[in-house]
Structures are given as C-alpha cells and as structure tokens.
Image (cartoon, rainbow, N blue to C red):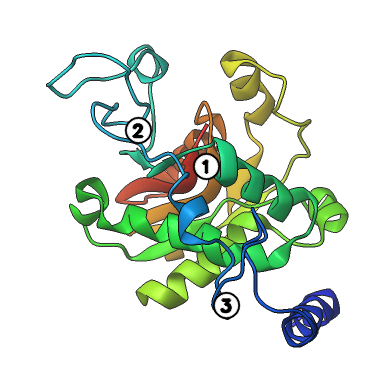
Amino acid sequence: MKIGTTLRRAGEALASLLYPPHCANCGADTDAGVHVCPACAGQAKKIAAPFCRRCSEPFDGAISSEFTCANCADRTLHFDCAVARYLSRGVVREFVHRFNYDRHFYLRRPLTDWLAETLDDERIRAQPIDALVPVPLHSARFREREFNQADVLAELLGKRAGLPVRRALERIRYTTTQTRLDRQERMDNLRNAFRVRDTPAVQNRHLVLVDDIFTTGSTVDECARVLRAAGAASVRVVTVARG
C-alpha cells in the first residue's frame, strides 16, 4: 500500500475519533461511517425515464418509447451502454469535485453507494461481468493527484459486488484537460491515448469500464475502442453521474 494512502486512511481514523460523524454536505449529525444525511441524499437528482438507452442522457419531454439522443445518434460508439443513476448536479457534483480535487478521500464511500446502483440496471444485468476496468490516469496526472479516482471507486465497487478488478488499460499519452473542449475536440484529444496492457486478459471477456463522470463519453468510448480491438466480447460503462 502506498505511504500516502496509509497516512490518509490513518488520518480518517483519527478524525473519526476526535469528531462526531456528520454529513459532508450540510454538517448534520449522522451515524458512524455515514457521510451524507438522508435529507441531502434525497437531494441527489436521479435520472428517470425517458432517457437515452445508450448513454443515459435524460430527455425532458413526453417520450414513452426508447430513443437515442443526439449525442449518440451521429457517431459510432464502441461501448454497449453507459449507465449512471444520478445527474452531476448539487450534492453529487460537489462530492465528486471534493473527492477528485480536494482529496476528501472519505467521500469514496457515498460515491460508491451511488455508483453501485448502476449494477441493478437491466442494461448491466443483461450480460455477465467478467471484470471491472477502471479508466486509467496518465502517470504524470497520477503524480499530481496521488490517486486515480476511477481506480479507487472500481476497487471498492468490486469488493462490494464480488467482482474482480482488472487494470487492463494504460494511458500512454498525456492529454490536456477535457473541461473546456467540445465533443469533437475531446475525441481528437484522446485519440491513441490508451493501450491494453495484457491482451489475453481481455479477450472474450465481458468488461465494465468504471469512471466518475460521463459527459460526452469521449474518454470511455476511446477506452472501449481499444478494448474491443484487443478482443473484448463486450464493453459497458458505469459512472457515478451523468454530466
């Protein structure tokens, strides 16, 4: 285990002894190990039908049949589906941001709670899961952040669900932040940024990519493309939230 991770977890344990448990959003008292109170959890905006069957983009209108959104309709996608149960709004977006950039590592637990709900989705349950595959960070970005948020979430999700985690992908090219790029720019930015580390480990396997946020899907689609090219039987995606 990395020294930084050990110290971080030790700090969390010490904090739990010195301070009573509380909601990380509003500060209300909670039970031990609970970081979001029922009231704040209830504010997390769930994705409800109708939504795109391919990427879970919700549609605010009167559609009763399945549909494909504009984000998916005019492109060739390499993942079978991308599932998120929550929108990246309010408390969900706040927790993701604080986990990723402020190193509030304890927030991995409520984030994994939200992530785990995707495994009950019929699109995920339709096929077996041979392994969870976290979306990798480039080594330079990893050194800046000191952890890969997708890897942490995949590891915890795997333990809860009894699923193996395979770090089958490697990010081989450093890319600029995607935040201010449009969809085409994101796709161009990520081209040839990933490779498969162990081809036999993914061949004929049903894989589920794990990441924190799905925005345009450019990152997970490039990962899925590489995995499918290496022989993966199928690639699905689960994320904490849909941007």
* Circle 2: residue type: Ser
Q: Is residue 21 above or below residue 243?
A: below
Question: Considering only order in the chain, which callout, 1 or 2, is on the residue closer to the N terminus?
Answer: 2
Q: 211 or 12, which is in the foreground? A: 12
- Of all residues, the one furthest to the front in this rendering is 28
Q: Which residue is mark 1?
A: 223
Q: Position of residue 212 (x, y in %)?
A: 56, 48
Question: Considering only order in the chain, which callout, 3 or 2, is on the residue closer to the N terminus?
Answer: 3
Residue at 66% across, 38% down: 193
Determine the secondary structure under disc 2.
Answer: loop
Number of numbered labels in the structure image? 3
Q: 238 or 44, which is in the foreground? A: 44
Identify the disc placed on residue 56: 2
Q: Is residue 230 above or below residue 203?
A: above
| Spatial separation of the CA atoms under disc 2 and disc 3 | 30 Å
* Circle 1: residue type: Cys
Crowding around mark 2 (Cα neighbors within 10 Å: few <14, some 14 to 19, many 20+) is: many
Q: Which residue is mark 3?
A: 33
